[in-house]
Image (tube, rainbow, N blue to C red):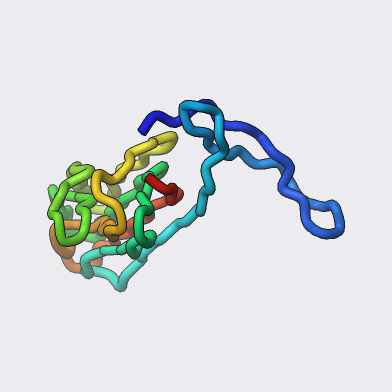
Amino acid sequence: MYYGPPVQVANTNADGSGTPRDLLTDATGHLLPVTDWQVSHLPATATKATVTKAAGGAGMYHVITVIHASLAAAATGTGPLTVTIVEETTGNVLFAGAVSAISGGNGQINLTGLKIKQPTANKGLTLEFSGAGSLGSQQAVTLCGFTVPA
């Protein structure tokens, strides 16, 4: 689906307060209902980071806007470890990358301004590392986006 240019609308509360926000339009200029979301996971050290955004409901698609994955190494370097976003049950891979970190260092993937629409409606998305890092290493993942109808 083609998304038209965002339209800024007032986001007002009953008392008149609030801040403007952008809403998406379809190709004909009609406003699309948007549900913003963000899911994160910061596990214990030397533990695989994984986070799932549940399915959006019948006829609903998730659109990914931000992907973050970070890996910090302690005394021993770690990696490379793959980072993927997979659509549940279909196995569709929407993103794949790799991260490694030298001893005492860190590596990360930070992608913003994305509009990756999942190919199948009403399916969850999982962002995860391929495995745990070395002893004392720390992983973190965050996935942000919005949900729209077909």
What residue occupies the far right of the structure in this picture? 15
Residue name at image x 14 percent, y 62 percent? 131
Residue name at image x 51 percent, y 53 percent? 35
Q: Is residue 135 left or right of residue 139?
A: left
Residue name at image x 53 percent, y 37 percent? 24
Relative to the observer, which residue lies in front, 48 or 138? 48
Q: Position of residue 138 (x, y in %)?
A: 29, 62
Q: Position of residue 15 (x, y in %)?
A: 86, 58
Q: Position of residue 105 (x, y in %)?
A: 28, 49
Give the position of the N terminus as an image quadrant.
top left
Give the position of the C terminus as an image quadrant.
top left
Residue name at image x 36 percent, y 66 percent? 42
Relative to the observer, which residue lies in front, 63 or 98? 63
Relative to the observer, which residue lies in front, 15 or 57? 57
Q: Is residue 102 visible?
A: no
Q: How many marks?
A: 0
What residue occupies the far bottom of the structure in this picture? 44
Q: Is residue 139 visible?
A: yes
